[in-house]
Image: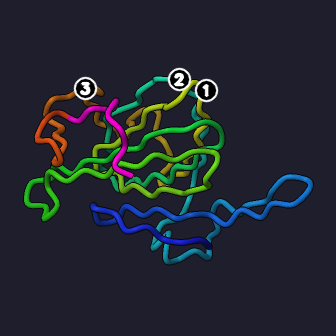
Amino acid sequence: MGNTMKTSLPGIKVYDLDKHPDERGFFVEILRMDWSEFLGDDDIVQANLSFSHPGVIRAWHRHRRGQVDYFLVIKGMVRIAAYDDQEGSSTRGQLFDISISEEKSRLVRIPGHYWHGFKVLGSKPALLVYFVNRLYDHDDPDEERRPWNDSNIVDPETGESYDWNKPPYE
């Protein structure tokens, strides 16, 4: 398993995955059940694939029943953001923001209680695989939604509404 990046919000983890290139291409392990430092008590129960065109923003949403998302970009580049607005949280008002791409294999863990989403960067579509620890319930989805440009999600760096178009922190 690769390097761990420290993040501003508890529970969010970013791991650089170990890519093993050779003359045929490359191989990379993207998720293993024995990565207990990364998974904690989570059991992955579903994998999803999301295709998005350049410039598309899929935000903001959260999960209130304990779902955790694990994001991996297969093609293209995306900016992932998460925001804590929980009453009484020591990190209330904090924002996590990272760009990930096919070039640098990273797995990003986001606990569902944070408002989160992503934007496709660059001129190519993005393929994003995400793993979850709860099955999707079509009859009673575990999702709350807000508009992608919700003015109540404030960037602590600027004190203004989060801007999906500003240069990334990283």
Question: Which residue is under mark 2?
Answer: 54
In the image, what residue type sits under mark 2? Pro
- Labels 2 & 1 near each other (Cβ < 8 A): yes
Point out the tag, 2 or 1, that comes first from the N-terminus: 2
Q: Is residue 128 left or right of residue 156?
A: right
Q: Which residues are magenta?
A: 162-170
Measured Cα–Cα span from mark 2 to mark 1: 6 Å
Between label 3 and label 2, give the one nearer the viewer: 2
Callout 2 crowding tier (Cα within 10 Å): few <14, some 14–19, many ≥20 = some
For image coordinates 53% across by 29% down, the residue present is 122
Measured Cα–Cα span from mark 3 to mark 2: 17 Å
Say which quadrant the N terminus sits in.
bottom right
The percent coordinates of residue 71 (x first, y second) are: 52, 49
Point out the tag, 3 or 2, that comes first from the N-terminus: 2
Q: Is residue 3 left or right of residue 170?
A: right
Tag on residue 124?
A: 1
Callout 1 crowding tier (Cα within 10 Å): few <14, some 14–19, many ≥20 = some
Question: Which residue is under mark 3?
Answer: 149
For image coordinates 39% across by 37% down, the residue present is 141
Dot 3 lies on which element? loop
Residue 64 or residue 14, whichever sits in front: 14
The percent coordinates of residue 82 (x first, y second) are: 31, 47
In the image, what residue type sits under mark 3? Asn
Q: Farthest residue toward the right? A: 23
Residue 118 or residue 169, whichever sits in front: 169
Callout 3 crowding tier (Cα within 10 Å): few <14, some 14–19, many ≥20 = some
Report the magenta stretch's main SS.
Answer: loop
Quadrant housing residue 152: top left
Q: Is residue 169 magenta?
A: yes
Measured Cα–Cα span from mark 1 to mark 3: 23 Å
In the image, what residue type sits under mark 1? Lys
